[in-house]
Amino acid sequence: MGQFAHPNVVRLRGVVTASAPAMILTEFMENGALDAFLRGRVGTLGPLQLVAMLRGIAAGMRYLAETGFVHRDLAARNILVDAQLVCKVSDFGLSRALEEESSADPTYTSSLGGKIPIRWTAPEAIAFRKFTSASDAWSYGIVMWEVMSFGERPYWDMSNQDVINAIEQDYRLPPPPRCPTALHRLMLDCWQRDRNARPRFPDIVSALDRLIRHPATLRVTAPEAHRPSPPRLAQRSPPGPPGPPFASVGEWLRTLQLGRYEETFSSAGVTSLELLPRLRSEDLLRMGVTLAGHQQRILDSAQSLQSPPKMDPHF
């Protein structure tokens, strides 16, 4: 930690070794941890201020990546905020030097076990304990979501196993209330399943710089999504319904293990099974169903519901 020198990385001031356990002395950060700071200021910081804070975090992570370090525990709780609202990356308890490999993306492979912060960790890091700057980019996307939701807990009250299963089924966190569309799009880029498809930290810094230079883009907000219920993810459903007709749109969605969209469909006026075969991908996007995997599952199943309409006996 003592080798780091960057305005968005916490500076080490000294080490106390005279007593056990040993302690480190860092620069004083008046506003403390970012997650608690945000929860105490819900709605008081504008989008441009939040983007500036995110830009600082990304700049600190760009520096760490260029220095050859992977953080492995990037989260709002591990970002400190000073009196001028400058954010600095801290808590390097899990940080490790990256091993140079033949690939362009060196990795650190953990063989020691230990706890992993599931809600912030990329799927490949959970499954194979392979950590890279790309897995840090996934975590950065979660930090973005924490910042734009003013410190809300990622995935709310879902269990860690439900989070793992949901991500495996292509679920991604919806945009927080009043979140600019461009920021949620960047979050989704950070959450690409293929780690090579995720933006690198220099790209993230550049994207945020463009938003800061053109603040009007921050006025375009994503459709407000309702908080989903923890999904029933013990078993994966086939794309289509299992056979018999359904009593309601809600029952149909629950069969697809997409019950989290019940309120979304209801708010959009899609309350009749007869309307489902008419849905198109652009309709789902307007409703706030942004994940391609979920869109395809809904559209495939909706088409299978198509059947001759019931005849009015008086027609």
Image (cartoon, grey):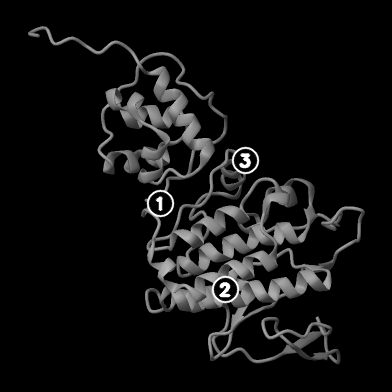
Q: Name the element at disc 1.
A: loop
Q: How far apart are labels 3 and 1 at the CA level? A: 19 Å
Q: Earlier in the sequence, mark 3 or mark 2?
A: 3
User: What is the three-letter code of the residue carrying label 3?
Assistant: Glu
Instruction: Assign the N terminus to one quadrant of the image.
Output: bottom right
Residue 99 percent across, percent down from the top left: 90, 61
| Residue 92 shows in this picture | no
User: What is the three-letter code of the residue carrying label 2?
Assistant: Asp
Q: How far apart are labels 2 and 1 at the CA level? A: 30 Å
Q: How far apart are labels 3 and 2 at the CA level? A: 32 Å
Can you name the residue that lies furthest to the top here? 313
Q: Which residue is mark 2?
A: 209
Q: Name the element at disc 2.
A: helix
The one nearer the camera, 63 or 252, is: 63
Residue at x 65% of width, y 54% of height: 118
Q: Which residue is mark 1?
A: 227
Q: Earlier in the sequence, mark 2 or mark 1?
A: 2
The answer to whether 167 appears left or right of 287 in the picture is right
